[in-house]
Image (tube, rainbow, N blue to C red):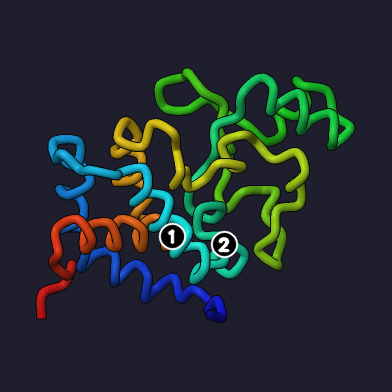
Amino acid sequence: MKKKSINIKAFHAEYKKKKKVLGPFIKNIHRRKIKGLRTLVNSSSDAVWKEIDCTRCANCCKQMTPTFTATDIKRVSTYLNMNRQEFIAKYLEKDEEGKEWINKKRPCQFLGNDNLCTIYEVRPYDCKGFPHLRHTRWLDQRQVFETNMEYCPATLKMIEMMYEMITGNSVIHK
């Protein structure tokens, strides 16, 4: 199957239609007794990545920001030939709670015009795992998926697939 380009406007319209069903589903999925959840998660993730190519989207890099750990800051600043303080001053700020380092601006300053990361080899850990579809503690991450559905076509697609497999219903009833 050929991976298609992502139309962000169409994706946002699709998200708005589906969030009323998928939001409560993912928020409360931990209450369901689902046999073989890990297998379901893995097969859904595999199916999603056959369809979606992040480099044709990069909406996460345009709309969201990763958190930067101390290790990320050291690795990226070294890669950019900057010291830690210079890197932080130029690119980062604390989040609203004042706990974590995040990008000062969006889209990400390291996103190239071609939707590719210019620091891909040393990108933050948060970016490496995004959108965390195969997280080992999947049920504990449901609030993350609920948020990510708004920004990530892969997350929306996976949650939709899981909804349909678990409930036997279509997300949008015709």
* Relative image position of residue 160 (x, y in whole percent): 28, 61
Instruction: Judge from the rendering whether residue 147 lies leftward or rightward of residue 107; answer left or right.
Output: left
| Picture residue at 36% right of the left edge, 42% below the top | 38
The kind of residue on which mark 2 rests is Cys
| Picture residue at 67% right of the left edge, 36% below the top | 91
Secondary structure at badge 2 equals helix
The quadrant where residue 143 appears: top left
> Which residue is at the far right?
81
Instruction: Judge from the rendering whether residue 153 lies leftward or rightward of residue 34; answer left or right.
Output: right
Which residue is tagged 2? 54
Badge 2 density bin: few <14, some 14–19, many ≥20, Cα 10 Å: some
Instruction: Judge from the rendering whether residue 25 lies leftward or rightward of residue 96; answer left or right.
Output: left
The quadrant where residue 105 appears: top right
The quadrant where residue 12 appears: bottom left
Instruction: Confirm or deny contact between disc 2 and disc 1 (CB under 8 A).
Output: yes
Which residue is tagged 1? 154
Q: Earlier in the sequence, mark 2 or mark 1?
A: 2
Label 2 – label 1 distance at C-alpha = 8 Å
Is residue 86 placed above or below 60 in the rendered structure?
above
The kind of residue on which mark 1 rests is Ala
Is residue 11 placed above or below 92 in the rendered structure?
below
